[in-house]
Image (tube, rainbow, N blue to C red):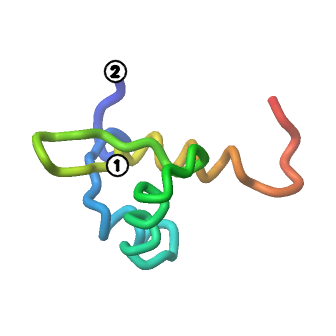
Amino acid sequence: MSSGTEDKLLTRRQAAEVLGFQPQTLARWKWEGREDRPPEVRVGRAVRYRASALYRWIAEREIGRAHV
């Protein structure tokens, strides 16, 4: 398991800020059942986003990047 800020759990608001979206966009994607949304972590009733998974999700969608 990695340590440091990579594995920090982000709130929906923090994750949306990283992505440049409104938090409601992430909530709507979850409600719509979009399978291509960033992976979530459930902590009790709260939804969180692991920073490392969020950055990996962004990298997977990079246009013009050679697939490794």
**Secondary element at tag 2:** loop
- Which residue corresponds to the image point at 51% horizontal and 67% vertical from the top-left? 19
Secondary structure of the residue carrying numbered label 1:
strand
Q: Quadrant of the C terminus?
A: top right
The N terminus: image quadrant: top left
Vertical relation: 11 (above or below) 24:
above
**Residue drawn at the location 49% of the way across and 58% of the way down:** 32
The amino acid type, in three-letter code, at marker 2 is Met
Residue at mark 2 to residue at mark 1: CA–CA distance: 16 Å
Residue 24 in the figure: left or right of residue 61: left
Q: Residue at x 37, y 43 (%)?
A: 40
Whether residue 55 sits left or right of residue 44 in the image: it is right
Q: Looking at the picture, which amino acid does disc 1 mark? A: Tyr
Residue drawn where x is 66% and y is 48% of the image: 59
The percent position of residue 44, horizontal first and vertical second, equals 10, 41
Comparing labels 2 and 1, the label whose residue is closer to the camera: 1
Name of the residue lying farthest toward the front: 32
- Residue beneath label 2, please? 1
Between 37 and 3, the one lying in front of the other is: 37
Residue placed most toward the observer, 12 or 36: 36
Report the residue that reaches farthest toward the left: 44
Name the disc covering residue 49, or none.
Answer: 1
Residue 27 to residue 1: above or below: below
